[in-house]
Amino acid sequence: MFGKKIFYGWYIVAASLLIIILDGMLLYSFGVFLPYLNDDFGLSRATGSSIFSFRSLVQAPAFILAGRLIDKFDPRAVVLGGGSIAALGMIFAGLSVTSWQLYLSYGLMVGVGDAVLYITCVALVSRWFVRKRPLAIGIITTGVPLSGLITNPLTAWLINDFGVRNALFALGGLMFTVLMASFVLRSRPEDKNLLPYGMKPGNSAEEIEKGAGAGAPKKDWRVRETLSTPTYWVMYSMYFLGFTTFLIIVTQFYNYMIDIGVPAIAAAGPPAAIGLGSIIGRTVLSSLLAEVLEFRKVILICFLAQGSSIILLLTVDHIWAYYLFGFIFGFFYSAWVPIFPTLLGRFYGLGALGTIYGIFGTSYSIAAIGGPILAGYIHDVLGSYHYPFIFTIFCCYLAAAGGFIIKTPRHKTKAA
């Protein structure tokens, strides 16, 4: 028992978890920094939020580039290089004295560098696991909500005790330290003379997955073939709508709490509850429930519940309701996130998954470009987040409807 060697893929999972925690830190910390950056640089809510939107605009082509880099180059170099650019961006943001410098550092540098972190790890873990792939992806993507649970109070404490600029320096330095985990990464099991987890000599990946009821493709799809299928674009739209909701909430919720008079440190609690709910939801729903329920049913339940939780935020004016909203919202948001890359691998194979998922990730960027800046602009005009939050409910319900449309794509057969 004690002599059994741990499969190297689990080390990949552990390193990927740490790297994705950094991705979550860059995401969640912005919402806490936003009101202080607005004050320091004299920015409106819409203009301050546009920094995040600009960062996301940069990420759209960066996601595609990252996907191609993952398919061709050593993931250690890709992650360390990209992560270092993002870390330097945080440090340079702390040195900025004008808003255009903030756009270059917190927008351009963080956007380009951050693009490689999440996509690289999901693509690698998908290659290393045939069986237990939903569990492995669920574990590593828990890094985003886990980071949310830690990042919000940590950032608020750093700002409160040391100031905005020193807080940016501290998080940039933390990134450089955690990026050392990238040296564990390997591109494929063959690099360690191994087979993917669950595969035995003589078995193909598709045979293993079909045995698990996954419906793997007979051969890997090419990128152009993938992009020609309606299923891909239905999932792309659902991903966009889901992240439009999430990004409006995560970038504006802390501001909302400050607006209604909650003290700064206490205001970090309900947004952190999103992280706590996400950790539990990602384990229970995506990693366990998805093993026994059809993926479409899990997606439908999650989007409906996520949208409905926002009604609680709009109708109950008590601190306990904000914590409860955060937990419920995070619980159901977290489950659908790892399901989509899992479905991409199962529908289209792993050969070009890095590029396929990189293109898919642009839906997140488009959501991030429009969602936060739209919410900030409406607040500037109307002085309230009521209508932006109603808009997010609509987005969730529309995404839920997509669960009825997703079908397993089939290769078109050419006539002889």
Image (tube, grey):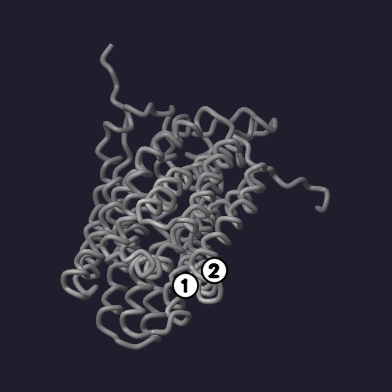
- Location of mark 2 (residue): 150
Against 218, is 242 above or below? below
Residue 38 visible? The answer is yes
The residues bearing labels 2 and 1 have C-alpha atoms spaced at a distance of 7 Å
Image quarter (top left, top right, bottom left or bottom right) of the C terminus: top left
Disc 2 crowd rating (10 Å Cα; few below 14, some 14-19, many 20+) is: some
Judged from this view, the residue extending furthest toward the right is 3
Q: Position of residue 158 (x, y in %)?
A: 54, 71
- Location of mark 1 (residue): 272
Which sits in the foreground, 265 or 349? 265
Question: Earlier along the polypeptide chain: callout 2 or callout 1?
Answer: 2
Could you tell me the amino acid type at mark 1? Ala
Q: Secondary structure at mark 1?
A: helix
Q: Position of residue 278 (x, y in %)?
A: 46, 66
Q: Position of residue 351 (x, y in %)?
A: 47, 29
Which sits in the foreground, 383 or 400? 383
Label pair 2/1, CB-CB below 8 angstroms? yes
Residue at (27, 66) in percent of width and height: 44
Against 244, is 6 above or below? above
Against 340, is 21 above or below? below
The answer to whether residue 355 is left or right of residue 387 is right
Residue at (50, 48) in percent of width and height: 86
Judged from this view, the residue extending furthest toward the top is 416
Q: Position of residue 97 (x, y in %)?
A: 42, 58
Residue 353 visible? The answer is no
Q: Secondary structure at mark 2?
A: helix
Residue 347 quadrant: top left
Could you tell me the amino acid type at mark 2? Ile
Disc 1 crowd rating (10 Å Cα; few below 14, some 14-19, many 20+) is: many
Residue at (28, 72) in percent of width and height: 308
Residue 344 quadrant: top left
Against 170, is 188 above or below? above
